[in-house]
Amino acid sequence: MRVIDSSVIAAFILQEPGWEKLASYLIGWTLDIAFLETMNAIIKALRRGRINIEDAHLRIKALESLKTMNMESALKLLPRVPELVLNSKLTVYDAAFIALAQEKTLPLVTLDKTQYEEAIRFGVPSILLRI
């Protein structure tokens, strides 16, 4: 089991180059906000002309049908996030995924180098994927 960051889910759903390699990592835990962050990435891709409206609808449906992960509420981790954010370069969202990995004592899987480096610094085993 692992904690999967939004960056991995978004790259898979948006079929970024190398996305096929990510399928085997989409099992484990994630935060409820990962789905909002991924939907936001879909909307950004639409607005930037990378995908059309029909494709956006298909990707949102694919995201909604992604049932291979256990989901945790980000609000549950709120007490742990400030310590991480105030002592790092992390966004609140990235810190929440690290907090989940700490709570579950599971490795974090991400495509975000800064998040990976900060997770390691906080003693969280992490996997930095490259696609």
Image: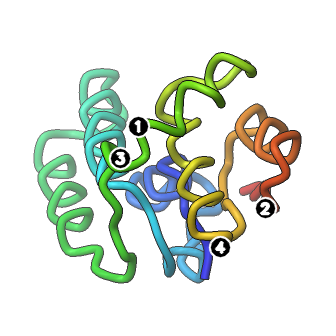
CA–CA distance between discs 3 and 1? 7 Å
Tell me the amino acid under the disc marked 2: Ile
Give the image location of residue 104, x and y in percent.
58, 69
**Residue 108: x percent and y percent?**
67, 60
Mark 2–mark 4 distance (CA, rounded to whole Å): 14 Å
- Which mark identifies residue 54? none
Viewer-nearest of discs 1 and 4: 1
Give the class, few, some or many, for how many residues have Cα within 10 Å of label 2's Cα (few <14, many ≥20): many
Question: Image quarter for residue 60?
Answer: bottom left
Which corner quadrant holds the N terminus? bottom right
Amino acid type, mark 4 = Lys
* Residue that appears at 81% across and 62% down: 125
**Residue identifier under label 4:** 21
Report whether 70 appears left or right of 61.
right
> Which numbered disc flags the more N-terminal residue, 1 or 4?
4
Q: Are marks 3 and 1 in contact (CB under 8 Å)?
A: yes
Q: Name which of mark 2 and mark 4 comes first in the sequence.
A: 4
Left or right: residue 39 versus residue 96 is left
Secondary structure under badge 1?
loop
| In the depicted structure, whether residue 79 falls above or below residue 61 | above
The residue labelled by disc 1 is 78
- Disc 3 secondary structure class: helix
Which dot, 3 or 1, sits closer to the camera? 1
Which residue is disc 3 drawn over? Answer: 74
Tell me if residue 64 comes above or below residue 44 in the rendering: below
**Residue 3: quarter of image:** bottom right
Q: Marks 2 and 3, Cα distance to the nearest angstrom?
A: 21 Å
Measured Cα–Cα span from mark 1 to mark 2: 24 Å
